[in-house]
Amino acid sequence: MGLIYGDFTIRNARKRGLAPQVVRALVDTGANILCIPPTLATELQLDEVEKREVVLADGAKHWVPYVGPVQLSFGKRHSFGGAFVVGDEVLVGAIALQDLDLIVVPALETISVHPASPHIARGVARGVRTPT
């Protein structure tokens, strides 16, 4: 399997007047948090919430800015959260993929909406009882 990329739209969820950015992002199911380069964080005027420690693929640990709120979109699906400011390309991790209800298609080296929910993202909430 090669590297998987997808086209996403990223915007500042608080400053809706700013233009969103369309990016080609690396999809990494081994990562958990969205990562964006410093230039994108600046363009989107994202506020630094705090510094967080990030462990890179080579095992190196670094303290990096954690910014937000970020709206990440894939087609008509949207996710909200924060992002690490690190690296030189956008990296979409497993939490955003799950929130957007996307799947990785290794044979095609792409991502797609979950076939069981083609029209709207769904989620799993175990242990929650529905109101009677």
Image: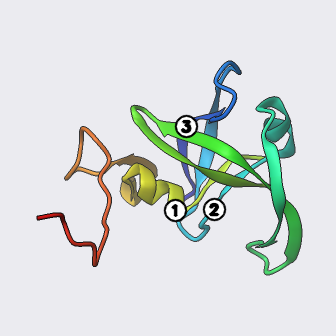
What kind of element bears circle 3? Answer: strand
- The residue type indicated by label 1 comes to Ile
Residue drawn at x 58%, y 61% is 28
Picture residue at 57% right of the left edge, 56% below the top? 3
Q: Are marks 1 and 2 in contact (CB under 8 Å)?
A: yes
Residue 64 visible somewhere in the drawing: yes
Q: Which residue is mark 2?
A: 33
For label 3, the crowd category at 10 Å Cα-Cα, with few meaning under 14, some 14 to 19 and many 20 or more, is some
Q: Which residue is mark 3?
A: 8
Amino acid type assigned to the residue bearing label 3 in the image: Phe
Which of these two is toward me, 96 or 50?
Answer: 50
| Residue depicted at 64% across the width and 24% down the height | 16
Q: Nearer the viewer, mark 3 or mark 1?
A: 1
| Residue linked to disc 1 | 95
User: Is 51 above or below relative to 58?
Assistant: above
Which mark is in front, 3 or 2?
A: 2
Which of the 4 image quadrants contains residue 8? top right
Alpha carbon of mark 3 to alpha carbon of mark 1: how far? 15 Å
**Percent position of residue 1, x then y:** 49, 63
Q: Residue at x 46, y 40 (%)?
A: 78
Q: Sequence order check: which comes first, mark 3 or mark 2?
A: 3
Q: Earlier in the sequence, mark 3 or mark 1?
A: 3
Quarter of the image for residue 65 reads: bottom right
Q: Amino acid at mark 2?
A: Ile
Residue 76 percent coordinates (x, y):
39, 32
- Give the alpha-carbon distance from disc 3 to disc 2, as whole Å: 15 Å
